[in-house]
Each structure stands twice: as C-alpha cells, then as structure tokens.
Image: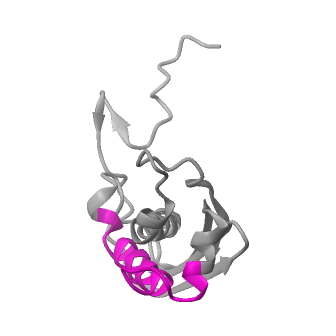
Amino acid sequence: MTDQDPSADLTHVEDGNAQMVDVGDKDDSQRRAVARGRIDLQPSTIEAIRSDGIEKGDVLATARIGAIQAIKHTWETIPMCHQIPITNVETEFDVADESVTLTVAVETVGKTGCEMEALEGVTTGLNVVWDMVKAAEKDDDGEYPATRIDNVEVIEKSVDR
C-alpha cells in the first residue's frame, strides 16, 4: 500500500469531481461487446412463456424491444458513458426449465467501447421479463421467492483497429 492518492489512476475523477473521459483523439474502430444474464422463474411461469400464456403478451418479444431501447439510451442512464452510434444489436433468449438466459451483442464503430450498452440491454431485457411475468411469479403473500436475476456479465469484448 502506498501513500499515493487512490483516485490518481481513476480516469473519471479529477480533483474529486466526476467527469467524462476525453476520447476525441482516439481513432474510430469497430467494436463489439457481448453480455449475458439469467432470470430464475418457476417452471409454471416458463411453461406460460413457452405457450404464450402470459396475460401481458409476448414476453420475449417485449423483452427484446426493451433491451434494444435500453441499449440506445445507455448514455442517458450511465453518467459517464459517451453517446455512441449503435450499428447492430443481436438478442438471444435461451428458455430452460427454470430460467431464461438473455445474451445481448452490441456493435459500434467509434472511439469507445460498447460493453455498458450490452450490460444495459441484458439487465433491462431481464427486468422486462420480470415485469411481464410478475403476476405469475407472486406467491400468496405477494412476494417473489423463486424469482431472481443473476449471473450478469460481459462475456466478450473486441476491438478491430
């Protein structure tokens, strides 16, 4: 441990004030990030998703739209994110017996990465799933004992310079 200021190496903090990193001098490059996460649900809820039996409508289609919308607005919700041009989004759902896994790939051509956009897509997409199925997931006390979102992670990040 040194006596050096621990914030000295932080790129978003200067003199105790948060600020966006200047990427203006960086060259544009093709970038891709892939994130993944899972929501655990009751088997009866999974069956209702598969059979289009959720009252609110098509769970996965709605979650896909929510994920894409979140990706496009990441810069508005994560304070130090740059607004970047999104060139492609891919969403993939894996519906298992007791969970739904969402994988989101985001691509851009620009000066900064898109992993926060991929994470926003995953977390919002899974939140939309929860919102769509919450009536089916509630127990008699109005709680969600089997429902949880976890394992959210960036699984790939690449830059082609």
Q: Nearer the viewer, residue 18 or 77?
A: 77
The part of the image, by quadrant, that contains residue 82 is bottom left
Image color mode:
one colour
Residue 125 location in percent, x, y?
46, 71
Identify the residue at image location x=63%, y=58%.
Answer: 153
Compared across the picture, whether 154 is left or right of 111 comes to: right
Q: Which residues are magenta?
A: 48-75
Residue 66 location in percent, x, y?
38, 76
Q: Is residue 31 visible to us here? A: no
Identify the residue at image location x=48%, y=66%.
Answer: 136
Dominant SS in magenta: helix
Tell me: residue 136, above or below residue 86: above
Compared across the picture, whether 42 is left or right of 144 comes to: right
Identify the residue at image location x=34%, y=55%.
Answer: 78
Q: Is residue 118 visible to us here? A: yes
In the rendered image, the residue lying farthest to the right is 97
Quarter of the image that includes the C terminus:
bottom right
**Is 44 one of the magenta-colored residues?**
no
Tell me: residue 155, above or below residue 103: above
The part of the image, by quadrant, that contains residue 40 is bottom right
Tell me: residue 18, above or below residue 124: above
**Is 55 one of the magenta-colored residues?**
yes
The part of the image, by quadrant, that contains residue 117 is bottom left
Compared across the picture, whether 9 is left or right of 84 comes to: right
Identify the residue at image location x=36%, y=59%.
Answer: 81
